[in-house]
Image (cartoon, grey):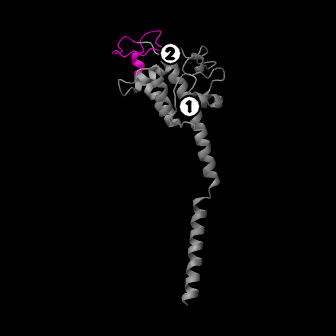
């Protein structure tokens, strides 16, 4: 299954950051909030994880449910299109259940309905209490993925022959080709 890149994950965190100034109310994050406020949002409205993402990425008036926010997150993380995008049943949460260590939370994988999906024993012992906690978790997630990307890149570099070896081999092949041509041309 596809693993999001660190760039894709950071992009998602940046989208949440765009709406952070709108999250004025103390209770602006409610993971069980299913309504999406389509007003001017000056009230510091309450949304869930998917609802806040929809607010950050909404492209049309037809997008009006946190399900659309879930779809947008899945798409922005590069997951293939799915038949449905529901809390607990979407490509991202399926991936998280299979990659708990990389996601960074072993106690909960219901990303769109439980604040404990963003649990961290020191930073977020009660899970996500606000939008900043969700952003922080995504940035930690991106750092873990980036560490793997760098390790894979390093491994690939170590498995490839050094450039000077490739140059020497090319020169040697060219020399043999010249000798072969001079033999035949004679």
Instruction: Give the residue displayed 48% in from the left and 18% down from the top.
Output: 131
**What distance separates the C-alpha of mark 2 from that of mark 1?**
24 Å
Verify CB contact (< 8 Å) between mark 2 and mark 1: no
Between 163 and 173, the residue placed more toward the observer is 173
What is the count of numbered marks? Answer: 2
- Whether residue 144 is in magenta: the answer is no
Q: Quadrant of residue 17?
A: top left
Neighbourhood count class around disc 1 (C-alpha, 10 Å): few under 14, some 14–19, many 20 upward: many
SS class, disc 1 = helix
Q: Identify the image quadrant of the C terminus.
A: bottom right
Q: On residue 117, which mark appears?
A: none
As drawn, the residue found furthest toward the front would be: 83
Instruction: Give the residue displayed 52% in from the left and 21% down from the top.
Output: 134
Between 27 and 88, the residue placed more toward the observer is 88
| Residue 179 rendering spot, x and y as whole percentages | 58, 82
Neighbourhood count class around disc 2 (C-alpha, 10 Å): few under 14, some 14–19, many 20 upward: some
Q: On residue 91, which mark appears?
A: 1
| Residue 20 rendering spot, x and y as whole percentages | 42, 19
Instruction: Give the residue displayed 50% in from the left and 20% down from the top.
Output: 49
Q: On residue 130, which mark appears?
A: 2
In front: mark 2 or mark 1? Answer: 1
What's the magenta bit mostly, secondary-structure-wise?
loop
Residues rendered magenta in the picture: 18-44
| Residue 81 rendering spot, x and y as whole percentages | 50, 35
Instruction: Give the residue displayed 56% in from the left and 66% down from the top.
Output: 167
Between 98 and 148, the residue placed more toward the observer is 98
As drawn, the residue found furthest toward the bottom would be: 186
| Residue 158 rendering spot, x and y as whole percentages | 64, 52
Q: Where is 165 relative to 133, above or below?
A: below
């Amino acid at each position: 299954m596809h693993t999001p890149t660190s760039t894709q994950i950071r992009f998602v965190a940046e989208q949440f950051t765009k709406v952070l100034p709108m999250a004025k109310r103390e209770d602006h994050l409610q993971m069980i909030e299913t309504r999406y406020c389509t007003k001017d949002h000056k009230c510091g409205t309450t949304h869930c994880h998917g609802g806040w993402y929809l607010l950050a990425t909404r492209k049309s008036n037809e997008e009006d449910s946190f399900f659309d926010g879930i779809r947008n997150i899945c798409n922005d993380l590069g997951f293939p299109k799915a038949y449905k995008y529901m809390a607990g049943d979407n490509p991202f949460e399926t991936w998280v259940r299979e990659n708990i260590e990389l996601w960074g939370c072993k106690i909960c994988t219901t990303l769109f309905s439980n604040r404990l999906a963003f649990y961290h024993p020191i930073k977020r012992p009660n899970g996500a209490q606000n939008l900043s906690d969700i952003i922080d978790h995504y940035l930690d997630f991106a750092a873990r993925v980036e560490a793997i990307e760098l390790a894979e890149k390093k491994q690939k570099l170590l498995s490839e022959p050094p450039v000077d070896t490739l140059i020497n081999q090319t020169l040697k092949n060219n020399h043999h080709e010249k000798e072969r041509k001079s033999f035949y041309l004679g």
